[in-house]
Image (cartoon, rainbow, N blue to C red):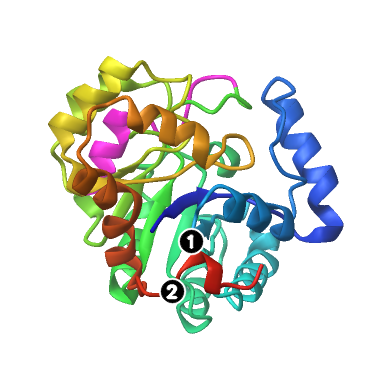
Amino acid sequence: MRLDFHTHCFPDPLAARAIQKVGHNAGDLLPHTDGTLDGLAALMRRQGVDRFVVLNIATNARQMKDVNDFAARMNEREEVVGFGSVHPKAENVMEELERIKALGLKGVKFQFDYQGLYVDDPCMKPIYRKIAQLGLVTMIHAGFDYGFAPPYMAPPERIANALRWVDSPFIASHWGGLSCAEGVLKHLCGLPLYFDTSYGYGAIAAPTAARILEKHGVERFLFGSDCPWHTPEMELRLLGSLGLSESEMDRVCWKNGAALLGLDREKKTEDLTI
């Protein structure tokens, strides 16, 4: 069984424009899907992924309701786990977090470079605590973002500072911080948070990835691809080069994430409608 904890798609009418814009801002990065949920689901099925988390971002307060309604619609498909998002500066941010819970979403995604504040901005303290009160998972984009110029909003040292306000599962994507491996090793490894493996292939050297895995522990790693920008097969190539045992691969690729989300192992890919 495989669970991809880090994927993206867009509502069908917006997908072509959105994927072109995001790819262009990152240096004309080529996508591996057409940006739609159907395109994403088809690729996941071809590459042996049984369940996948779709991450949404509210880049401004006006988007929050639509973003979370889209996540809730995606959740109607059994293979999908849609995460919601809130904009930290929205006046109704606490009410929208409660609505995310009521919609049955499992978690909340932040991308602070898009949202214009640091991961440890003081305004985040009550938001992290509300997320914990509601029993939701927090996922953040961690480290560099190739679509933005520095400074970046969630470097490892600021993530470590924010964790003092966190009392619920917290995931720093991209091996704890894209292009920030030394900072991850210094500031984050061993702390109570998860890393995902998304966008690692070609972006992190295998010896460095092995050091992070050893220091942080496979029990706090989640398999993720960042599809459509990378694919599950790409990230599995990196993981497969790190000398993990079969049981350790199973932990990273299924058990850790399934335990966080309360997923049933018995529902196989071939049983799901795509």
Q: Is residue 197 magenta?
A: no
Quadrant location of residue 145?
Answer: top right
Q: Residue at x 54, y 68 (%)?
A: 270
Q: CA distance from mark 2 to mark 1?
A: 8 Å
Task: Report which residue position mark 1 lands on.
Answer: 50
In the picture of the structure, the residue carrying the numbered disc 2 is 267
Question: Which residue is more in the foreground, 177 or 246?
Answer: 246
- Residue 180 in picture, x, y percent from top left: 36, 21
**Does 226 sit above or below residue 241?**
below
Q: Quadrant location of the N terminus?
A: bottom left
Position of residue 113 in the picture relative to residue 41 (left or right): left
- Taking the image as shown, residue 126 lies to the left or right of residue 69, namely left
The disc at residue 4 is none
Q: Is residue 193 visible?
A: no
User: What's the residue type where badge 1 is placed?
Assistant: Asp
Q: Residue 235: horizontal and vertical position, in percent?
A: 45, 34
Does residue 229 appear anywhere in the picture? yes
Q: What residue is rendered at 34% in x and 69% in y?
A: 130
Instruction: Name the element at disc 2.
Output: loop
In the image: residue 88, left or right of residue 69: left
State the extent of the magenta-drawn residues as a range: 149-163
Identify residue type, mark 2: Lys
Asked whether 150 falls inside the magenta stretch, the response is yes
- Between 264 and 166, the one lying in front of the other is 264
Question: Residue at coordinates 32% horizontally, 73% vertically from top-left?
Answer: 262
